[in-house]
Amino acid sequence: MYVCLVVLGAAAVLVIGPYEGIAPETLILLAVVFVVAESIARLVDGGRTGISPSLSVSLAAVVITGPVGAAVVGLCSSLLLRRQGLVKRLFNGGQLALTGYAAGHAFQLLGGEQGVPDRSDFPWIVLPFTASILVHTVVNVLLVTTLMWCLGVVRIQQVRTVRWRPLAVLELSSMGYGMLGLFIAAVWGLVGAFAVLLVLLPLFIARWAFDQYIAEQRAHDATLATLCQAVETKDYYTRGHCMRVSKASGMIAQELGMHAERVQTIRYAGMLHDVGKLGVPTKVLQKSGKLTEEEFAAIQLHPMRGYEIVREIGFLDEALAGIMHHHERMDGRGYPMGLAGEEIPEFARIISVADAFDCMTSTRSYRKARSIEEAIAELRRCAGPQFDPRMVDALISAVARDGWETPDAVEPPDDDLVEVAQQDHDDPSVPLRVAKEAERS
């Protein structure tokens, strides 16, 4: 029903018009360029987000052809050259038609005039054009968000914390990209359709460079995933642990309001926090009973070994400190250096909480998994002496909002290795039982 309303609304706009002052050849050319630009949109973030130069073409149509012309150009997105279902094509066409129509009216309401701008229109045309960009963004977001709500993908709930930084970065990027539409409109009067090529050719080159960047990021992720698999091959009871710690660390970082680059880096740190276990004997990692002093000392060396293994990987940057110090404690009784409080790097304090949380909610050879509620209660109890309370609160808030999927128990490859043994929680070398359980994670 919602899709039908959007499509009917776009159809009504096109039927009502008016089309006075719109050159048919200009409208057709803008529509063709828009379809081509939209067809080469680069999908990122797992295919959920698109980067496309079509925004610039759509906003150029707002200036050159007015609200109705922009609606016609937007409707042409239903003619994309990529594979899409009919319903999706119709919704995209209707959505972008209404978005262009609203942006066009905002432009004219603040004094913008339909047609190719000349020198006398500058710099005052920038104000109504900026307003059209903002309206274009807001209407587009509202239409898509409503669709996601109808589909049950998003829920409307009270927002407790607003992450202004990513919103500001996104909006500024959109405005900068949209301003190219004004450049296309201004140059159109001099060189005609060639104006689009002048603007979009650099964007296509930028898209190619972005493709190279994405390929490099995927290579980074594949490299780190391989190291994680190597660790988990030695310690099968923690299968998937590295990726879950990576996810929980990212959730904490986002809750703290870190910018995207640091969030990605903390995820890398979470993936590799146990890479030093490659230097720990397999029989120690897979031992189900109490560890001897020598075995415990071998495990205590894994943060430093992990640092030595990955320190030459340049893109890890701040993640290295998180890998080396994620077993430090706020009271200074951790290892490998006995740092305390704010001396412990922020990444290490994040990973420490994420590591312990996943350890407690996972099944081990020496005990069954705890419930999420029990794990959260234990984190609260240990906040202060062992964990940074700020990181604990951030994880609890993120889990309450986004949920957490606990892993299935992992069956060992050899039944002889599984002897039911109760982990000794009274070991004086580890005062809190959460810290002792985390040694095996």
Image (cartoon, rainbow, N blue to C red):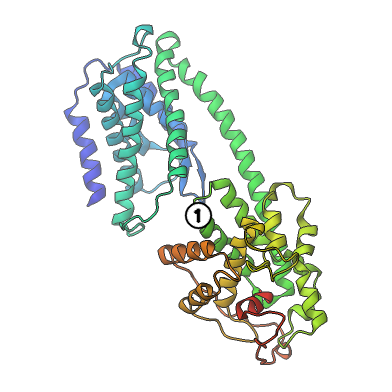
- Judge left or right: residue 338 versus residue 408: right
Picture residue at 79% right of the left edge, 69% below the top:
301
Percent position (x, y) of residue 235?
71, 75
The amino acid type of the residue labelled 1 equals Leu
Q: Is residue 93 visible to us here? A: no
| Near-viewer residue (236 or 69) | 236
Picture residue at 59% right of the left edge, 61% below the top:
350
Q: Would you place residue 196 above or below residue 405 in this image?
A: above
- Judge left or right: residue 137 versus residue 348: left
Picture residue at 68% right of the left edge, 79% below the top:
430
Q: Would you place residue 60 above or below residue 381 in this image?
A: above
- Judge left or right: residue 176 versus residue 23: right
Q: Tag 1: Cα neighbours inside 10 Å, few (<14), some, or many (≥20)?
A: some
Which residue lies under the disc numbered 1? 256
Percent position (x, y) of residue 193?
44, 16
Q: Would you place residue 19 above or below residue 309 in this image?
A: above
Percent position (x, y) of residue 237?
66, 78
Percent position (x, y) of residue 387?
58, 68
Q: Is residue 435 visible to us here? A: yes
**Where, by quadrant of the figure, is residue 112 drawn?**
top left
- As helix, strand or loop, the secondary structure at mark 1 comes to loop
| Near-viewer residue (275 or 142) | 275
Q: Quadrant of the C terminus?
A: bottom right
